[in-house]
Image (cartoon, rainbow, N blue to C red):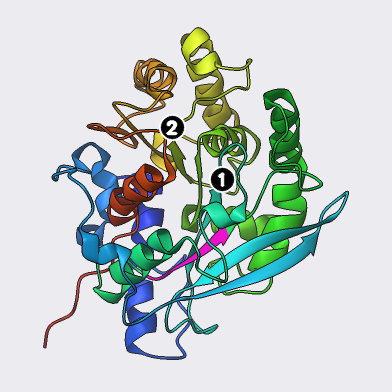
Amino acid sequence: MKRRLFRRALASLMLPLLCSLLLPGLSARATDPVPEEDLDALSRGAEMGRYDLSAMPERYKLPATERGRIISLTYDNAWEETLCYVYLPYGYHPDNRYDIVYLMHGGGGNPGSFLNDARQNQMFANMVDHLIEEGTIRPLILVAPTFYRFGHTGRSLQDSWDDLNAFSQGEFLDDLVPFVEGRFSTYAETTDEASLRASRTHRAFSGFSLGAVTTWEIFINHMDIVAIYLPISGDSWHLGRGAGAQRPGETAQLLADTVTDAGLTADDVLVYGFTGTKDGMEYQMSSQINAMRGIGDIFGDNLIYRVREDAQHLLVDMDEHLFYMFQDVFPAPPKMHP
């Protein structure tokens, strides 16, 4: 019986990675066969997140014993040299393969909203360190870029929209992805189109606020190389500013058409959105997600949406949203017992 393509591809993350951890020097491959009984929890999307969404425990905000490395890098795009931060998990080794998550800041932010090499924003990096150290999530490579051009973080909404469009339509694929994935070990064998397509289930894009707007644009422009989308507190503006609330049905249909036009189905895409009850973007995001849920043939169990009680439109709440999202989307493989 034919199984879901997306479920099988996502499941292939688990056992190959486990082998690479147990046998140093063995490179896992996304194409390794995986028994049906070892399908990843993502195949049960509707069941994800069924735990208490209370505040993240304080210990996750403090430094872990095993800390990943954050490095600052600059790369050239079409108009300037620009900064990004890359998080390499503790024990990173180029012989192993790692899932990669691109993290986009919100309006007025910068790559340091998630990461920086001085660890001035320590909560997010500390949280990831702890989750990896305790074996809750598998080791990840994280990349924090910016969509702002020329360092203009205070640009108007229209200018910011222009900037994030330039990033999502060109810079992301043309410059950032080959720069990062050509240097660090992901599931992409090379950075050519065929390899990026083959490794799409090991690549995620997430963003907060205008970063979530960017995430929806990556969905529309790069469905062929990215399978996992984690928007936080933001709707799609592709049909106009605030279109997720003002034109939810049309927006949902556009996103559904993006999937089918790529020759894919709901089983090939994971959308996991998060916001808070006191977040000013909750109405826009909920309107769009509810419309997407109405297109059941395209957005089925692999469309997940969580609204945390009392969470606001703040970076500290964004960090806590990701605390739960990462556990759901990137669980560590089960430990083998003698």
Q: Using residue 285 as the reference point, say whether residue 60 is left or right of it.
A: left
Taking the image as drawn, is residue 270 in sight?
Answer: yes
Disc 2 packing (10 Å; few <14; some 14–19; many ≥20): many
Considering the image in quadrants, where does the N terminus appear?
A: top left
Q: Secondary structure at mark 2?
A: loop
Q: Which mark is residue 233?
A: 2
Taking the image as drawn, is residue 190 in sight?
Answer: no
- The image shows residue 199 at horizontal and vertical percentages of 54, 59
* x 56%, y 65%: residue: 116
- The image shows residue 94 at horizontal and vertical percentages of 55, 83
> What's under tag 2, amino acid-wise?
Ser
* x 58%, y 67%: residue: 86
Q: Using residue 105 as the reference point, say whether residue 308 is left or right of it.
A: left
Q: Is residue 238 above or below residue 51?
A: above
* x 35%, y 43%: residue: 317
Q: Using residue 326 as the reference point, say whether residue 191 is left or right of it.
A: right
Q: Which mark is residue 105?
A: 1
The stretch of residues the image draws in magenta is: 139-143
Farthest-out residue, left: 338
Q: Using the numbered discs, state the Cα–Cα distance from disc 1 to disc 2 in whole angstroms.
A: 11 Å
Disc 1 packing (10 Å; few <14; some 14–19; many ≥20): many
